[in-house]
Image: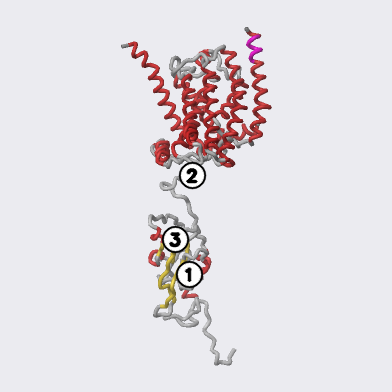
Amino acid sequence: MSQTLKNLYPLVIIAVVLGVILNLAAVLVWVERRLLAVWQDRYGPNRVGPFGLLQPLADSIKLFLKEDWIPPFADKPVFVLAPAIIVVTALLSFAVIPFAPGFVVADLNIGLLFLLAMSSLGVYSVVLAGWASNNKYSLLGGIRASAQMLSYEVFMGLSMLGVVIIAGSFRLTDIVEAQRKLWFVIPQFPGFVLFLIAGVAEARRLPFDLAEAESELIAGFHSEYSSMKFGMFFVGEYIGVTLISTAISLLYFGGWLGPFLPGPVWFAIKTMAFICFFILLRAAMPRPRFDQLMLWGWKFMLPLALVNLLATGAVVLALS
Amino acid sequence: MLSLLRSLWEVFRHGFHKRITVQYPEERPYLAPRYRGRIVLTRDPDGGERCVACNLCAVACPVDCISLQATEDENGRRYPEFFRINFSRCIFCGYCEEACPTYAIQLTPDFEMGEYNRQNLVYEKEHLMVNGPGKYPDYNFWRVAGVAIGGKDKGQSENEDKPVDLHSLLP
């Protein structure tokens, strides 16, 4: 009997993680609209339910009732598949995220690599959506997304390698435990800044939302999408934002470590703080031109990440 | 780079500013007395209709939403037989008010005219007429105009001289 319970435990974790993440993605729609409003001296949606908290429900009911239109010129199977990919890859990444000691779906010893791989796979969704839409603006968005991912993925990996060098492990639990004395944000501050920027680009959020760029590309890769397929892109985007925020708090801010409050609470606080920071970025930043984006990535960020990696490696080697 | 950080900080500080939104149904916005909202037809201080059915408002109206028919009562006072404003066309420009020689047509600070049925937006005279002088409490067109009507002859208006006797040679 106790053996069955033990076998059920991972399933319970999966159910909890899925429930929390998917609901969080919905609530984030409300959070984002409220916070953007707050920073623009408005109130935001505050009518549906207490504080407008039921707004996501109203939004999703609306989305479900919309016509689910597939354009006749689209590549149908790919068009349908694309929104699923973004959600699946983003959710898969959460398999390796430890929410508390032991509370993790799969504590892989290459957890960080898995996370990177899954979040990179997410770009397929955008590229395929842009391609399958058979629309020049969507295709432009897809192309931009792929170029952006390629250039920002490189130094994203390099910037977090500093953390891996200090912690000596790719396992996320080990990385968090290695921060008992000092959060990695202090010795790895340049790496943290680089990772933050790369993370915003990875999540395709403003100011790096060139794939979407509603003012120039008319919503880019998802201009042909409607109803819940469109909704899936947004769920995927918000899960992506949550993922990057959890990654930042795990790698640089000591995950569940913190005084007085229980671990998961600390983890949630840190993650929410970064999600709010993402939204603040959206409220404050202008969108760069595409060539500026690429130039920054390759000529500035990548060398900086390499220098950071070299310096970290040298210091760790000298101290050992 | 520094300017980006500064704008981040400035936007963050806006979270603690006063809200600009007016929470409308509970909280009413302030509307200036000369706000251009629902159109009304006003009356003289003594209660008579001000409109003399001159059609200037209908002519001035850029969207042709005003229509009226002039007629005369037993005292020789012109007044509109019907007066109709189609508010589904009206753009609330206020030209009718400017054109009106008798201050009869006026725009008011009221904009809550929503209807479910478009036909209900066509206001007839009984919907437009109000029991008051509006923005010009003391003005009475018939008392200052040099027009003879029943009960008031030529030369009996305010500030009006007696009519000149054409047959007299006296200066």
Circle nearer the N terminus (3, 2): 2
Instruction: Check disc 1 and give the amino acid type.
Output: Tyr
Q: Secondary structure at mark 3?
A: loop
**What is the spatial separation of the Cα atoms under label 3 and label 2, in whole angstroms?**
27 Å
The N terminus of chain A sits in image quarter: top left
Q: Residue at x 45, y 41 (%)?
A: A69
Amino acid type at circle 3 is Phe
Taking the image as drawn, is residue B151 in sight? no
Badge number at residue B139: 1
Q: Position of residue B151 (x, y in %)?
A: 42, 80
Which region shows up in magenta? A312-317
Of callouts 3 and 1, the N-terminal one: 3
Mark 2 = which residue? B21
Compared with B60, A124 (above or below) is above
> Which of the two labelled residues, at mark 2 and mark 1, occupies the earlier sequence position?
2
- Callouts 2 and 1 in the same chain: yes
Q: Residues within 10 Å of mark 2 (few under 14, many from 20)?
A: few
Residue drawn at 44 percent across, 20 percent down? A264
Cβ atoms under marks 2 and 1 closer than 8 Å = no
Gap between marks 2 and 1, in whole Å? 39 Å
